[in-house]
Image (cartoon, rainbow, N blue to C red):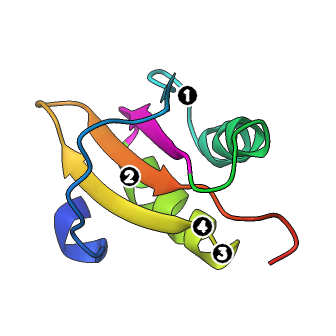
Amino acid sequence: MNVEASVQVQRIPVRYADKELNLKGKICPYTFIESMLALEEMGIGEVLRVIVDYPPAACDVPESLTKEGFEILEVSKINDTDWAILVRNKAFGE
């Protein structure tokens, strides 16, 4: 599976994340559900960094969060097994 080819995101420089969520060892749909729960606890405009090691999650989490109205800032492979997904929180109800 070519994750990089199937994920298209706008590249915006982000120097930090307000919160990091390590979801290594978890599979879909739990990666999406836990990402949503973390975002619900965060402030509007804050950035969440989600770490996944399940290849389908590197595509599915950004796609699902985009459908929910969140802004995906970056999806990047950080080593041989892991991806980082940077997502900016939205105002709920948007």
Q: Quadrant of residue 35?
A: top right
Q: CA distance from mark 1 to mark 2?
A: 12 Å
Judging by the rendered image, the residue that carries numbered circle 1 is 26
Tell me the mark number nearer the camera, choosing from 1 and 3: 3
Q: Is 22 located above or below residue 72 in the figure?
A: above
Frontmost residue, 64 versus 18: 18
Residue holding disc 3: 69
Instruction: Choose mark 2 or mark 3, whichever is in front.
Output: 3
Q: Are marks 3 and 4 in contact (CB under 8 Å)?
A: yes
Report the Cα–Cα distance between label 3 and label 4: 4 Å
Q: Main secondary structure of the magenta part?
A: strand
Quick one: quadrant of the N terminus?
A: bottom left
N-term-proximal mark, 1 vs 2: 1
User: What range of the chain is rendered magenta?
Assistant: 46-54
Q: Which numbered marker is on residue 58?
A: 2
Earlier in the chain: of badge 2 and badge 4, it is 2
* Tag 2 secondary structure: helix
Q: In this image, 17 relative to 1: left or right? A: right
Q: Is residue 80 above or below residue 15?
A: above
Taking the magenta stretch, the answer to whether it contains residue 49 is: yes
Q: Residues within 10 Å of mark 2 (few under 14, many from 20)?
A: many
Report how far apart the C-alphas of labels 1 and 4 lie in the structure: 21 Å
Residues under labels 2 and 3: Cα distance?
A: 17 Å
